[in-house]
Amino acid sequence: MGTQEQPEAWRDESEERLRAFIESAPRKMWIARPDGTVEFFNREWRDYTGQGGAEGMLNWREAVHPADRPRLDEVRGRAVPLGQPYDVQVRLRRRSDGLHRWHIGRVSPVHLHGRLIAWIGAATDIDNRVRAEAALRESETNFRTMANAIPQLAWMRDPADYSIWYNQRWFDFTGTSMEQMQNDGWWTVIHPDHADLMLEAVTAARAEGRSWEYTAPLRRRDGVYRWHLFRAVPIRDEAAGTITRWFGTSTDINEQREAQERQRLLTQEVSHRVKNSLALVAAQLSLQARASDNDDARSVLMDAYSRVLTIAGVHDHLWRQYDASFIDMSGFLHGLCRKLQETAPGHDLSFTGDRVIVPTDQAVPIGLVVNELVTNALKYAYPGDRGGPIRVTLRRDGEDAMILEVMDQGVGLPAGFDLSAPTKSLGMRLLVNTVRQINATVDAERLDPGTRFAVAIPVGRG
């Protein structure tokens, strides 16, 4: 492609129209001769750089940041002799404050009748974009550095639950690759016995757009499964509020889990031994009661037998459940009433109740309260050999309390009965003291026929 100048092409009317267009263009533009020598800079260039006239044509490189000039010369040096268009990204100095701002320069050849007659260039300010991209790259680099430094396995997935990113610790632990983790690949490293349940829980949480957590065994690269606590939070577009991705971590809790399991087994063993010891004491009391010729002594021994048996029942219930810290009072009281029914076959003792979870240390006194109220009904509501119904109910009273009721259809309370008055009855004294111990209140109501005791109990939080 030739580079011979055609001066006449620069003096015709078309050139004047072209110059007028470039002069008023809203970006920095210029015209150069076929050999690349600048012939004309428009007003936007002159205003920005402060260069104008012949001096500006000769010294335009001074507007380019010194560090960018070698790259500019290299790109121009390759393209100009071949008459090829080129792009180059450089920083240009702004006259008003001396700052250099990033620009993208795009230069194109102008041909006439197959011959190169000029070059037209334009420079667009891209400084904001360049700096934003640099800030984003730095932010991503910082994020990845931090994510790889944290002790947890970390990952990101998109709203459709496809893999976007995993930190290096994930790959080091699982021995997998990003290719293997694409789509639903991460479920392959969750223990098969837990994968479906975990997927169900995670899918439900994602559908509601809420954070989730789940505990499941994760397969290590050597095939060994270790318990991990998985947690994930949604990341939202601040403007639209839509979820753009999910960020999650997996924390190895295997040692903690094993320690909890050992503690659970130890607690169950201790509770089991205590229950057996109490059952032995109860059996001795029962033997003493049956062997006694004194009716009063027999009654006291049987009362003690019933109370010890109640406490043993708590421990029996405890050692059979996974978490010994809390207890379902509904299940426990149902079992307690069943055992009390065995001691009084002539009566109809039943229990109904809501599921209420309380700390274990609250369960023992509540069990004693039920034992005293039921035993009292068995003794006094139906004198002689007469039997009758006794109903025990448990219901929630809001979030922080429950109501325990024991009702019978017997002869009713004696005249002048007052729970707040001093009494010689060991059972009533024990009832009042136990109720006070758990910060509860007890009321007695005469029915027609029978009696209703209602105990309002605050639900402890542990």
Image: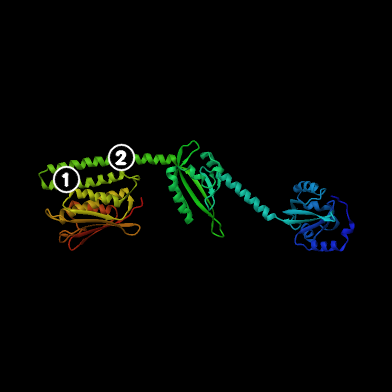
Near-viewer residue (270 or 41): 41
Image x and y of residue 52, in percent: 82, 58
What SS does tag 1 mark?
Answer: helix
* Residue 312 seen from this side: yes
Q: For this rendering, which residue is in front, 105 or 135?
A: 105
Is 223 placed above or below 332 here? above
Q: Position of residue 387 (x, y in %)?
A: 15, 55
According to the picture, the residue beneath numbered tag 2 turns out to be 270
Q: Amino acid at mark 2?
A: Val
Residue 255 rendering spot, x and y as whole percentages? 43, 39
Determine whether, in the image, residue 397 is placed left or right of residue 372. right
Residue drawn at (81%, 50%) of the image: 83
Q: Select label 1 or label 2 by which is in front.
A: 2
Q: Please say if the residues under marks 1 and 2 sit with CB atoms less than 8 Å apart.
A: no
* Left-right relation of 412 to 174: left
Q: Which residue is mark 1?
A: 301
Point out the tag, 1 or 2, that comes first from the N-terminus.
2
The extreme left residue here reads 293
- Check the image and name the residue furthest to the front: 113
Q: Which three-letter amino acid code belongs to the residue tagged 1? A: Leu
Distance from the alpha carbon under mark 1 to that under mark 2: 26 Å
Is 197 left or right of 388, judged from the image as shown?
right
